[in-house]
Image: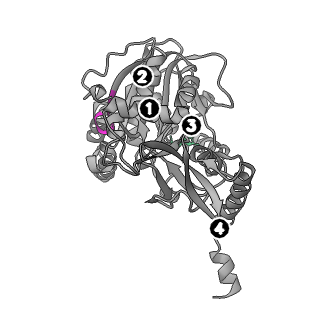
């Protein structure tokens, strides 16, 4: 191989990853040689200019690291638009807020469908943490008609005036930082990252009172004794995040779609190593210390926690259901039936299988509806799993 060929094959993202590693090690040194897992995720995923979501990796889609429902099919956004329409119709000047809009594909499909059905909405707000993804969203959404494009507002901070309408978040909670813990000899340890013998390693530390008590109360609630070595995740600060999000809504509904379980299932005896998962170039694996800053790291959502923090804010859980039931209730199959072109129909049928089949996204992904100062009645037919929370 010539030097020219070597240069051609060189992947610049690997240089970026080395830089992230160097800076991470420096950061660990400034923190007396140990940082918590939550701090590690915050650094490698969100540190401005360095982290996975802050830097330029492709991330989402077939040429990125992972694929989401809106990237698989426009039917996902069309179905979601069907579900939010009656809620928007309830208000005179409704708006939509999308949290973590990825490439902007879901926003594009929702607004296209709302336009086609002449559903009125005032603004489509996007709250996006990643400057890089914000640019991609702006580029994709520039293809919308000018009158729709003018309704889109990217939020730099939480708006002063709350809205009436809908908040949507697809695969956002799974991307929020989480704490990892392990139980040993009846004690709870918090997992963190250290740098020893020239290597980044996972290292446990005796948990503080707050984490120990939280793990103990989960065990008590679900009637389980975490056995030695049991490792899992927990989003200790989730309530703070949720309160910020819900405060943007004066009246309306919130749709959270994500992969996850009820608490009982989340901390199942058999799930001995938690649900943390890493994605690099569309391959899933379990090593968060590889591909630093250029791979996705996430963990499933404890939907009982989402229901709990909502309840604390007097927000009602409207339903909790599987993605497949949610989309079927949203008439996703009717959209395919109405397509005349046979080629397109076949393509959409393949896509919808990925969204609905139980061994694909249909059952692992769930949808939770939360209602604030509203009681929508158009979800009666949905198979409700609230009793499992
Ligand atoms: C897994 S991606 C999902 C993207 C998109 N919703 C989709 O379904 O394709 C997570 C998204 O949430 C964004 N994000 C992560 N944490 C966030 C936060 N605290 N506030 C707003 N957006 C956040 C990421 O930048 C990214 O756009």
Query: Which numbered disc, 2 or 3, marks the residue that appears first in the sequence?
Result: 3
Which residue is painted at 51% across and 11% down in the image?
Answer: 92
Q: Position of residue 64 (x, y in %)?
A: 53, 57
Q: Quadrant of residue 366?
A: top left
Q: Mark 4: which secondary structure?
A: loop
Which residue is painted at 32% across and 16% down in the image?
Answer: 377
Cα separation, mark 2 vs mark 4, equals 49 Å
Q: Which residues are magenta?
A: 320-325
Q: Is residue 324 rendered magenta in the image?
A: yes
Q: How many marks?
A: 4
- Look at discs 3 and 1 and give the one toward the viewer: 3
Q: Are marks 2 and 3 in contact (CB under 8 Å)?
A: no
- Look at discs 1 and 4 and give the one toward the viewer: 4
Which residue is painted at 65% across and 67% down in the image?
Answer: 197
Q: Are marks 2 and 1 in contact (CB under 8 Å)?
A: yes
Query: Which numbered disc, 3 or 4, marks the residue that appears first in the sequence?
Result: 4
Closer-to-camera residue (139/7): 7
What residue is pinned by disc 1?
Answer: 256
Packing grade of label 4 (10 A; few <14, some 14-19, many >=20) is few
Query: Which numbered disc, 1 or 4, marks the residue that appears first in the sequence?
Result: 4
Query: Which numbered disc, 2 or 4, marks the residue that appears first in the sequence?
Result: 4
Decide if residue 105 is on the left or right side of residue 29.
left
Query: Which numbered disc, 2 or 1, marks the residue that appears first in the sequence?
Result: 1
Cα separation, mark 2 vs mark 3, equals 32 Å
What residue is pinned by disc 2?
Answer: 370
What residue is pinned by disc 4?
Answer: 197
Instruction: Tell me the tag on residue 208.
Output: 3
């Amino acid at each position: 191989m010539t030097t020219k060929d070597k240069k051609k094959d060189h992947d610049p993202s690997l240089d970026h990853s080395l830089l992230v590693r160097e800076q991470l090690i420096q950061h660990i040194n400034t923190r007396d040689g140990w940082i918590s897992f939550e701090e590690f995720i915050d650094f490698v995923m969100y540190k401005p200019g360095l982290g996975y979501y802050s830097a330029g990796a492709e991330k989402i889609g077939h040429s990125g690291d992972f694929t989401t429902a809106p990237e698989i099919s426009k039917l996902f956004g069309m179905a979601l638009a069907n579900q939010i329409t009656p809620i928007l119709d309830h208000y005179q000047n409704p708006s939509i807020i999308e949290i973590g809009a990825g490439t902007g594909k879901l926003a594009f499909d929702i607004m296209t469908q709302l336009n086609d059905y002449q559903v009125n909405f005032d603004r489509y707000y996007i709250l996006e943490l990643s400057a890089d993804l914000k640019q991609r969203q702006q580029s994709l959404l520039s293809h919308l008609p000018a009158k729709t494009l003018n309704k889109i507002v990217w939020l730099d901070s939480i708006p002063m005036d709350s809205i009436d309408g809908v908040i949507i978040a697809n695969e956002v909670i799974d991307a929020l930082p989480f704490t990892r813990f392990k139980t040993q000899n009846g004690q709870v340890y918090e997992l963190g990252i250290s740098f020893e013998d020239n290597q980044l390693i996972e290292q446990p530390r005796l948990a503080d009172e707050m984490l120990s008590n939280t793990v103990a109360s989960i065990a008590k609630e679900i009637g389980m004794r975490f056995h030695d070595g049991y490792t899992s995740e927990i989003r200790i600060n989730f309530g703070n995040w949720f309160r910020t999000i819900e405060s943007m809504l004066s009246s309306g509904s919130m749709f959270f779609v994500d992969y996850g379980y009820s608490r009982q299932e989340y901390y199942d005896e058999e799930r001995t190593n938690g649900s943390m998962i890493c994605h690099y170039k569309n391959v899933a694996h379990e090593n968060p210390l590889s591909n630093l800053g250029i791979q996705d790291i996430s963990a499933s959502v404890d939907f009982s926690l989402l229901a709990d923090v909502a309840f604390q804010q007097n927000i009602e859980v409207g339903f909790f259901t599987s993605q497949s039931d949610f989309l079927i209730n949203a008439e996703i199959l009717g959209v395919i039936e109405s397509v005349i072109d046979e080629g397109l129909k076949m393509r959409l049928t393949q896509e919808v299988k990925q969204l609905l089949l139980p061994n694909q996204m249909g059952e692992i992904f769930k949808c939770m509806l939360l209602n604030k100062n509203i009681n929508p009645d158009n979800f009666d037919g949905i198979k409700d799993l609230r009793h499992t929370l």
